[in-house]
Amino acid sequence: MIEASPAVEGGAPNRMSRTHVTLSMVVLAAALTAAPACAQSPAATRTAVPSDVAAKIGDRTLTVDEIDRKWRELDAASYMKSTQEMFDIRRRVIDVLVGDHLLAEEAKKRGLTTEALVAQEVPKRIQEITETDLQAAYNQMRSQMGGRTLDEVRAPLAQYLAQQRQTEARQALVDELRAKASGIEVYLDPPRFTIETSADEPVRGPANAPVEIIAFSDFQCPYCARVVPTLERLQETFGDQIKLVFRDFPLTSIHPQAFQAAEAGECAREQGKFWEFHDLVFANPRALGLDDLKGHAAALGLDTAAFAACVESGRAKARVQADLEAGQALGITSTPALFINGRHVAGAQPYEVFEAIIKDELARRK
């Protein structure tokens, strides 16, 4: 049987994937609800304490918030990852429970069982699997095929796609019911990270936009280049509702030219041409040497002597380093790392992931 890996962009899975609950989620739910075989009831051995109290050390009370603050101080990266994963799991489980409720209510209206409703309606929404679909799936999972050809794995691959289409069709039915339903409100708030920005950061969009996207990026990172058109499309779609802020996060351990390119970007910013320089560098990923950067400056009509002096003097280094340290304090370990009103999105995720978060943020402000 073929196991599908999650869609990955920039080293991060697409956490907004609308598939059924995975086995790991089921195991997690079981672990959270099952009582240990030899555990005593807490009520039998402890005095009741407020729900936000996690421990006591003598006369000192430790709250969950205090522990989380220390956790973030000690290991910001694991704090960011774990809190986001917990939110994502809870959000997916909410969607599962909402879907189960909507299907049960619709079945009740029709005098059917939920199983009968699903059996009746889901097949109508299943899309046919074409040869193009099989080839695309094979190409996506080629590394898992052990050198086997498409013909050799056609049957299990078709079975996998059929299961996937079944899940998608069921979700389509749930979406249709949800669009017509009332009384469904989700209050779960995602983890947010506070990021201070200065007044002279490179910005696209109005200062008072309701949605702020802060992008920590690396000019030598191919996934950072890949997310650029996605961000441009978002700004075209949402217009003045979005403000985009650029921050430097050069991964010098794997991208040796990234730091100097970031300095060059700062030097272009001094002449009011940061975004033009940004677009030109990402459009020419192999042209990041000092002479290349000077050539970009000349192509944009910058004062090339001033630009060269800025880059060669190293005076922009402190500003790039400050961005890098700010990102590290947040727990960033890879690029691109984006924050939508403080909500972390790791990697060059598909457009739909960003769109869903932005729509959610706008809805929360109504």
Image (tube, rainbow, N blue to C red):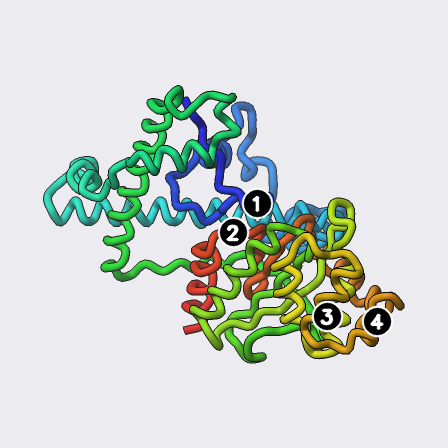
Residue 338 numbered tag: none
Q: Are marks 2 and 3 in contact (CB under 8 Å)?
A: no
For label 2, count other residues whose C-alpha is less than 10 Å away and answer few (under 14), some (14-19) or many (20+). many
Within 10 angstroms of label 3, few (less than 14), some, or many (20 or more) residues? many
Q: Amino acid at mark 3?
A: Ala
Q: Residue beneath label 1, please?
A: 12
The numbered dot on residue 310 is 4
Q: Nearer the viewer, residue 67 or 27?
A: 27
Q: Position of residue 309 (x, y in %)?
A: 86, 71
- Which one is earlier in the sequence, the residue at label 1 or at label 4? 1
Do the residues bearing badges 1 and 2 touch, measured as CB atoms within 8 Å?
yes
> Mark 2 and 4 residues: CB-CB less than 8 Å, in contact?
no
Residue where numbered disc 3 is placed: 297
Q: Residues within 10 Å of mark 1 (few under 14, many from 20)?
A: some
Q: Amino acid at mark 4?
A: Cys
Q: Marks 2 and 3, Cα distance to the nearest angstrom? A: 30 Å
Q: Is residue 283 above or below residue 203?
A: above
Residue drawn at x 49%, y 46% is: 14
Residue 320, x across and y down, in percent:
78, 63
Which numbered disc, 1 or 3, marks the residue closer to the eye? 3
Residue 115: x percent and y percent?
20, 36
Which secondary structure, mark 3? Answer: helix
Q: Earlier in the sequence, mark 2 or mark 4?
A: 4
Q: Quadrant of residue 38?
A: top right
Pick whichever of labels 1 and 2 is earlier in the sequence.
1
- How far separated are the C-alphas under marks 1 and 3? 33 Å
Identify which residue is drawn at 46% across, 47% down.
Answer: 90
Comparing 197 with 132, the one in front is 132
Q: Which sits earlier in the primary sequence, circle 3 or circle 4?
A: 3
Identify which residue, 142 or 159, lies in the foreground.
Answer: 142
Q: Quadrant of residue 238?
A: bottom left
